[in-house]
Image (cartoon, grey):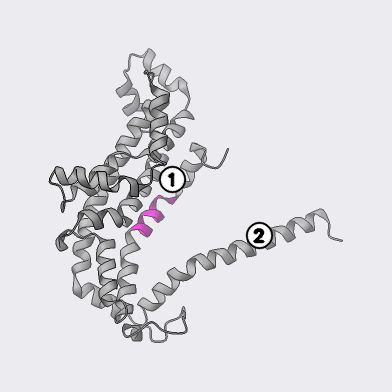
């Protein structure tokens, strides 16, 4: 018979092995992609059976990607779009979240309910109205349709409201006693304290903008305006079966900015989750 301590250790060990197995399972496609991109012979066909260690290790596929240069043009397009999308998304979410958290105005609950309702509408249902609107404005094949929708960030507004709700009301009351208005209170007190949630919103907005595929596919037809996902899709369709190694190298390069941003901001994300109540309290 195992003691209570022994049972606890056994359960912890089983859970650890289960989580380790799930982690390996989720990482396997990513590791396989890296392995194929470093496989010299995989320029011809997908290596079979699949292996994680390249048979002929080489950076030849990455060299071809660098020499092509087209990926870097799409990198520039995605970087500009993602940068402005992050700025607009985070700014609007902070301002709206503060208004819903500390503001006092008529219809506040109804408006917040409307914000929550927009999260339940699938993007596919908004696709045609959005296309018609930007087409009437003459913005098709420009960066504007890929940037402006970021202004409405319902999830960000909800996260910011939850975050600001947890800050002491005394901060705001003390500032009001000193004669500060709402804008001063926001920019001098609440905005400086919003570092963790700002970092979280930034990486979510960056990831959403950088990986966006369906909406850019609808509004972008010009080759020079293509973003990274569009270029990767067309490159894979045209060359994937013949140049699978180069395709995998291109895919690996396409996710590199997201990995770098996440590594820099991950500590803020964990802190934000703890403070905004997303841990299921």
Counting residues from the start of the chain, the first of labels 1 and 2 encountered is: 2
**Residue carrying label 2:** 15
- Dot 2 surroundings within 10 Å: few (below 14), some, or many (20 or more)? few
**Residue carrying label 1:** 268
How far is the residue under mark 1 from the one under mark 2? 27 Å
| Left/right of residue 21 with respect to residue 62 in the rendered view | right
Q: In the rendered image of this protein, does residue 235 appear above or below residue 126? A: below
Image quadrant containing the N terminus: bottom right
The secondary structure type at the circle numbered 1 is helix
Residue in the picture at 33% in, 13% down:
179
| Left/right of residue 264 with respect to residue 51 in the rendered view | left
Magenta stretch bounds: 258-266
Could you tell me if residue 194 is visible in this image?
Answer: no
The image shows residue 98 at horizontal and vertical percentages of 38, 28
- Dot 1 surroundings within 10 Å: few (below 14), some, or many (20 or more)? some
Q: Look at the magenta stretch and give its main secondary structure.
A: helix
The image shows residue 259 at horizontal and vertical percentages of 38, 59
Could you tell me if residue 247 is visible in this image?
Answer: yes
Residue in the picture at 56% in, 64% down:
22
Q: Within the magenta stretch, is there residue 263?
A: yes
Q: In which quarter of the image is residue 220?
A: bottom left
Q: In the rendered image of this protein, does residue 265 appear above or below residue 117? A: below
Q: Are marks 1 and 2 in contact (CB under 8 Å)?
A: no
């Amino acid at each position: 018979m195992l003691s209570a301590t022994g049972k606890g250790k056994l359960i912890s060990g089983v859970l650890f092995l289960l989580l380790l197995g799930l982690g390996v399972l989720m990482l396997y496609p990513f590791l396989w992609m890296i392995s194929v991109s470093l496989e010299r012979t995989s320029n011809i066909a997908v290596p079979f059976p699949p292996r994680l260690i390249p048979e002929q290790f080489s950076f030849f596929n990455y060299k071809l990607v660098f020499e092509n240069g087209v990926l870097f043009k799409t990198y520039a397009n995605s970087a500009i779009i993602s940068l402005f999308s992050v700025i607009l998304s985070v700014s609007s979410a902070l301002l709206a979240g503060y208004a819903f958290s500390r503001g006092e105005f008529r219809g506040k609950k109804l408006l917040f309910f409307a914000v929550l309702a927009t999260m339940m509408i699938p993007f596919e249902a908004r696709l045609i109205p959005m296309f018609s609107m930007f087409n009437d404005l003459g913005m098709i094949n420009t960066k504007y349709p890929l940037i402006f929708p970021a202004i409405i960030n319902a999830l960000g507004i909800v996260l910011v409201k939850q975050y600001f709700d947890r800050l002491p009301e005394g901060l705001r009351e003390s500032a009001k006693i000193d004669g500060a208005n709402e804008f001063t209170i926001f920019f001098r007190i609440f905005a400086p304290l919003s570092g963790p949630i700002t970092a979280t919103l930034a990486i979510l907005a960056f990831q959403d903008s950088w990986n966006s595929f369906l909406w850019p596919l609808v509004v972008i037809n010009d080759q020079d305006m293509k973003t990274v996902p569009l270029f990767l899709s067309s490159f894979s369709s045209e060359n994937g079966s013949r140049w699978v190694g180069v395709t995998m190298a291109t895919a690996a390069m396409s996710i590199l900015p997201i990995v770098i941003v996440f590594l820099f901001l991950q500590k803020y994300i964990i802190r934000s989750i703890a403070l905004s109540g997303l841990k299921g309290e």
